[in-house]
Image (spheres, rainbow, N blue to C red):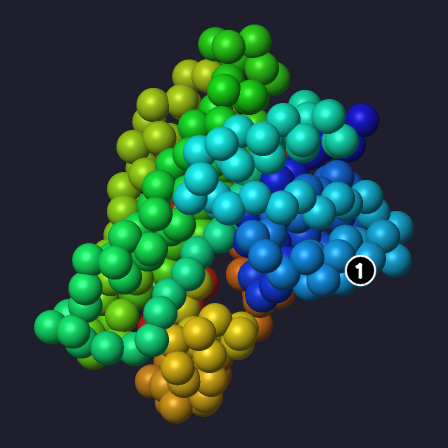
Amino acid sequence: MNPVLLITGGSRGIGAATALLAAQRGHAVAVNYRQDAAAAQQTVLAVERSGGQAVAIQADVSSESDVERMFREVAQQLGPLTALVNNAGILEQQTRVEHLDAARLRRIFETNVIGSFLCAREAVRCMSTRRGGQGGAIVNVSSRAAVLGSAGEYVDYAASKGAIDTLTVGLAHEVAGEGIRVNGVRPGLITTEMHASGGEAGRVARLSAGVPLGRGGEPEEVARAILWLLSDEASYTTGAILDVSGGR
C-alpha cells in the first residue's frame, strides 16, 4: 500500500508542486482546497497523468469540523494517513501595523495558525504509535518572513509563521517517542500567485536582487525540500526548520 499524504492548500503553488512530486515518489495524495475546486482538480489530473493517485478534498482548515471531516475522508478514500504537509496559508494586502484591525488579524491567525494546529492535532491522532498508529511525518510550511519580519508589508503574516516555527519545534519534541517526526521549511521569495494576494504580483522580481543566489525560487525547489523531510533519508531529523530561500 502506498504511503498516504495530505497536503493542505494543495491546489496551487508550493502545495501543488509538492503533490505532484510526492505522487511521483509513490505517495497517494489528498489535495486539500478551500474554495478553488477547479484548481484542485487540475492538480489531481496532473498527478493522475503522471501515473499517481490523488483525490481533492474541500475543507476550510480554520474550521474544526471541516478539519475533522477532511481527515475522515482521507482515511476513507486513500487509507491510513502517513504524512501531513501543513501548507495552507493566507496573507492580505501589504500595509503597516498601524493600519491593521482585529478582523484581519483573526483571518490570518485562524487560517495560518489555528488551522495548522488543528491539522497537526488530527495527524497525531491518526499516526501516533501511542494511539495505535504506525507513525509518520509532518512538515509545516513556514516562511522566511518569520525571521525577517516583513516590515511595511505584512508583519501579521510574518508573526503567524513565527507561530508555525514554534509549533514545529514543540510538537517535534512532544511526539518524537511516538513514531512521528515534525519538521518545517521556511521558503523565501518563491514565484507563486500568493504575492498577488498581497497586492504586488511583481514582488519577487523587485526583491530578487537582494537574494544571494540572485533570483527568486520555484515551487518545485521547495517541494524537493519537503519531500526530503518526509522521506526515510531524513529519519534522524526532527524539530528542524530548513530555509529554502536562496540565502536571503
Q: How many marks?
A: 1
Q: Residue at x 60, y 52 (%)?
A: 33
Q: Left or right: 219 with respect to 3?
A: left
> What residue did someone put label 1 on?
46
Q: Position of residue 92 (x, y in %)?
A: 35, 69
Q: Left or right: 172 with respect to 148?
A: right
Is residue 146 at all visible to an observer of this figure? no
**Residue 81 in the image: above or below residue 208:** above
Q: Residue at x 76, y 31 (%)?
A: 77
Q: Amino acid at mark 1?
A: Ala
Q: Left or right: 26 with respect to 11?
A: right
Q: Left or right: 10 with respect to 243?
A: right
Q: Position of residue 202 (x, y in %)?
A: 45, 88
Mark 1 packing: few (<14 Cα in 10 Å), some, or many (20+)? Answer: some
Q: Residue at x 38, y 36 (%)?
A: 117
Q: Position of residue 170 (x, y in %)?
A: 29, 32
Question: Considering the numbered disc 1 on the image, is that residue within a helix, a strand or a loop?
Answer: helix
The answer to which of 189 and 80 lies nearer the viewer is: 80
**Residue 203 in the image: above or below residue 117:** below
Q: Residue at x 61, y 17 (%)?
A: 134
Is residue 101 at all visible to an observer of this figure? yes
Q: Position of residue 113 (x, y in %)?
A: 34, 46
